[in-house]
Image (cartoon, rainbow, N blue to C red):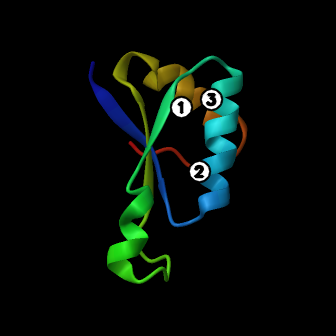
Amino acid sequence: MSMKEILSTNDPTMIAFASALLEGEGIDSFQMDVHMSVLEGSIGILPRRLMVREKDFFQASAVLRDNDIPVSE
C-alpha cells in the first residue's frame, strides 16, 4: 500500500482537525513525525506530516480544501 503526504504543518491542532475530517469521510490517515519533538527539544519547529493512501488522495484533498486546509502537492 502506497501512502502520500496530504498535509505538513507545525500546528498540532490542524493535524487533529484534518484527521477528524478525514475520519468522518471514512478516509484512513496516518500521522508521521509525531515524536520528533524529542530531537528538536519540544519547540515545535519540525513539521508533522499527515499521510493518506494514494488511492484516497484525490477525495482527501477535496475534503481538506473544502475546509480551508492547505494540501501538500
Q: Quadrant of the C terminus?
A: top left
Left or right of 59 on screen, residue 38: left
User: Is tag 3's residue or tag 1's residue first in the polypeptide sequence?
Assistant: 3
Is 27 in front, or is 36? 36
The dot on residue 15 is 2
* Residue that appears at 32% across and 76% down: 39
Left or right of 55 on screen, residue 43: right
Across and down, in percent, residue 28 comes to 52, 24
User: In terms of image quadrants, where is residue 34?
Assistant: bottom left
In three-dimensional space, the C-alpha distance between marks 2 and 1, rounded to whole angstroms, equals 14 Å
In three-dimensional space, the C-alpha distance between marks 2 and 3, rounded to whole angstroms, equals 11 Å
Q: Quadrant of the N terminus?
A: top left
User: In terms of image quadrants, where is residue 6?
Assistant: top left
The number of numbered badges drawn on the structure is: 3
| Residue type of the residue flagged with mark 3 | Leu
Look at mark 1 in the image and give the residue it sits on.
61
